Amino acid sequence: MKEKEFLAELAEITLLNQTLALLDWDSQTGMPEEAATERGEASGYLSGLAFEKQTGPKLKEALDYFSAHNDELSEVGKTIFTVTKKDYDQLHAIPKELMVERSRLYSEAHTAWVKARQSKNFADFKPALEENIRITKELIPYYKKDEATDYDVLLNLFEPGMTSAVLDEVFSELRDGLVKIRQLIAQKGITPDTSFKNRTMTTAQQKDFVKNLVAQLGFDFNRGRLDDTVHPFATRLAHNDVRITTRWNEQDFTMGIFGVIHEAGHGIYEQNMAGKYNMTPVYDAPSMGIHESQSLFYEIILGSKRSFWQKQYPIFQAAAEGTFDDIDFEAFYRSLKATAASLIRIEADSLTYPLHIIIRYELEKALFNGDLTVAELPKAWNDKYEEYLGIRPDNDLVGVLQDVHWSGGMFGYFPSYALGYMYAAQLLHAMEKELAIDNLLIKGDYAPIKNWLTEHIHQFGRSKTPNELIKAATGETLNPQYLLNYLSELYQNVYQIKA
Amino acid sequence: MKEKEFLAELAEITLLNQTLALLDWDSQTGMPEEAATERGEASGYLSGLAFEKQTGPKLKEALDYFSAHNDELSEVGKTIFTVTKKDYDQLHAIPKELMVERSRLYSEAHTAWVKARQSKNFADFKPALEENIRITKELIPYYKKDEATDYDVLLNLFEPGMTSAVLDEVFSELRDGLVKIRQLIAQKGITPDTSFKNRTMTTAQQKDFVKNLVAQLGFDFNRGRLDDTVHPFATRLAHNDVRITTRWNEQDFTMGIFGVIHEAGHGIYEQNMAGKYNMTPVYDAPSMGIHESQSLFYEIILGSKRSFWQKQYPIFQAAAEGTFDDIDFEAFYRSLKATAASLIRIEADSLTYPLHIIIRYELEKALFNGDLTVAELPKAWNDKYEEYLGIRPDNDLVGVLQDVHWSGGMFGYFPSYALGYMYAAQLLHAMEKELAIDNLLIKGDYAPIKNWLTEHIHQFGRSKTPNELIKAATGETLNPQYLLNYLSELYQNVYQIKA
């Protein structure tokens, strides 16, 4: 066995996965309606081929050989070996019957979830959710290494190395800090005028502005593209083919514009991993939280900065062809950062958003550690919204049924969103020690920012763990204070609170 | 071996081919520029998987088994077996080294062709073309069954059952007839005014008109889509996913509009093959000529009819938002059918078009039957243009270098274009015995026309030969007189020639 043969096998798996990514991208961007069943067959068949290779004898032979002859691998080869072996061990251990049952249950649960959303009644989803939790609990032993709790096992599938002990502490600090900022705003703040935000800006005007903007930020359209979809996403078809999508609302320009900035953050990450890892499992993010840190860095960290909009607002006004000419910069900027409690996570503002995540984290943990039954879930959900956000859902559709994740068995995923948020603020803090960010933003000189992120995060792919990356980039492990400081300063400024 | 297993193997091959079609569609409609190399690797890998299965032991086992146990197959199964066996025997016989060499030569020839087009000098393409002819001659013995000449073997790859003996007769009749019509026009005709044809019609206006039009004609957008591309094409990704593409010219609406009608003709065909042949090699056209007959039936047969435009012109005027309001119907209609000799095949009008094809046919035949060397080709080309069309190319770019086919080894393909044309006119003649076509067109009642084509052509896929199809549909074999009659009447009318 030569390293070359090992890499060739990985490349074939990558080519199958790239093709699967195209099949999926296409099905979400414009595939004819009635093609869904046939597309399902094509995706299913190719997934099967990929799975066979990923758990097949050729890969096993390579892994066995290089376990014994690790010294025959190059430095890059060793990294690729380590990551591949980790994936193989996890994937290979699970009995095929369980995988098949899981797929079937997820598919049934998705149908039940859609039905429950129509009836606005959690009861229609309850049995399927119970089944999803059951099968997940059956799978946990196959994933388990040395995690302290079942829920930690799930966390680790998305954020390797993360524990609920850490999250409990970090999230409690974050929650208390956010509540404090919200109290301060309620008592002393001046609420921004948002009356003009629903003025019509056409899709073409928005697209024109934001495509130009994300190209400046560093998204390379020679190696990527932007399309319309119902659910925005970023996907890598290949090292030189990274695609982002968005949805538009002509009465709310923020949806499309911040959506594209967010996905471009993911896209810039995918475009800037080191070429030496291309066509191997190392060419990927080490965790969902790290991936989200890059999208949120662009969308919420840079996109919330006064200096950012000082440069961009005149360009935005020109793109809107006069629609916002009577709105001065201050009013425009403040309107972007208005905050209010709301029920729907994906529509939440940047101050209240993390509270939505903390609620889901606490509920998930309780479900898996035996402190909460599925039957108790809706009430627990509503109680927490009342406690943390001061509002209570009227029905399950705007409450416990709003997110798709649990119907697909994605337990342990939600914390990634808040982790990404905290990582992003922590990265800004570190970056500011080296770069005069506000000056760069005022000039529209974005390259040094992208280069800093590439140097400290993007290039590494999965060759470092999330912890290693954050520590190397910022000098310390996850610390929620940077996000709290950022939000505190930002909202005091926007809400004109004197110190 | 059960029929079910045989069909399952064919379905897997189909799924691979569908995926390859998506990879190709995507690369032509919007793939990021720099992704070409990686896309080539993905397509190459999947092509390899498809080829392995198409010539692999599982298919061989099924074919061997059902050769001996044909009675165990259903009626549909027997048809599928026959077509599959024919493909297998052809594909399997060719030595792999020859296939590899052929791919390499085609690729080199394409590069040489592009270079020669830049220099406008055939000499830069000559060695590569000679190599392509050499390798094709080496391949002919593997394809050969009982054809009389080498060129007939090539013809049969695209039009099974066609011979140059038939084509010689048919094309000579066609050529003489077309020359006569052209002479009549030159002597007695009144040339239509085309001065307004270059008025600006935006892409959006054209798209709006023609999407609506082809939907009425029968192209199902729930099972298909339309996209922009450099080179228009139609492709089937699946039974319920047929895609057509076009290019637009805002100063020449005919390019986009007739282009979409043409591709929709291909698309309607692909959408209406019988479902029982889905996921098998029978779900395809029996020949290139038959496929082209469907696109040309819509583009040139229906699309040249006065009755067709009587219904559509007011809708077209409305779509153009006033641009053509001062042009009366007669002037508009006549402008569509103006004819003049020209050098470029793909821009030729519907009267002179077949002459371009006849020229290429005569040259190809001479190249393969030993009557012409590659060195003599440019002069022979120019001489024929002068003889048949009365004009002579200034340089090779507008002459012998204009078409891509020979660089890709597609010898024997060109006749398909003229065959399709003649088939289309012959089908119209048969259809008119059953349907009052002009009445239907004036009312915009297109369903009976599509249904007639589905009943007589579309549904059969490859279960009948081209000859069988045309004979069953029209009561006779290929007869060029129907096209000549159609064109003669049409152009006498448009050029206002009194009988």
Image (spheres, coloured by chain):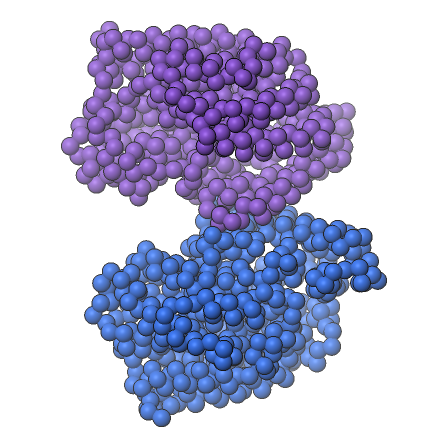
Chain colours: A purple, B blue
Q: Residue furthest bottom?
A: B499
Examine the image and state in which quarter residue A426 appears: top left
Task: Residue at the far right: name it.
Answer: B68
- Which residue is depicted at the point 34% across and 57% down? B208
Residue at 32% across / 11% down in the picture?
A182
* Image position, residue A381 (x, y; %): 46, 16
**Residue B251, relative to residue A250: is it above or below?**
below
Question: Is B337 on the left-hand or right-hand side of B406?
Answer: left
User: Is residue B180 rendered to the left or right of residue B404?
Assistant: left
Image quadrant of residue A66?
top right
Q: On the rendered structure, is A206 left or right of A92?
A: left
* Residue B396 visible, this orientation: no
In the rendering, at what x and y percent does residue A404 appear?
49, 28
Give residue B471's position: percent from left, percent from top: 60, 78
Q: Quadrant of the C terminus of chain A?
A: top left
| Residue B66 position within the rendered picture, expressed as x and y whole percent measured from the top left | 80, 60
Relative height, residue B311 to residue A367 (above, below): below
Residue lying farthest left?
A326
Q: Quadrant of the N terminus of chain A?
A: top right
Q: Tell me which residue sits at (72%, 28%) in the image.
A: A95
- Residues B184 and A361: in front is A361
Can residue A112 be spotted in the picture? yes
Foreground residue, B371 or B124? Answer: B371
Q: Which residue appears at 61% of the width and 24% of the height?
A: A131
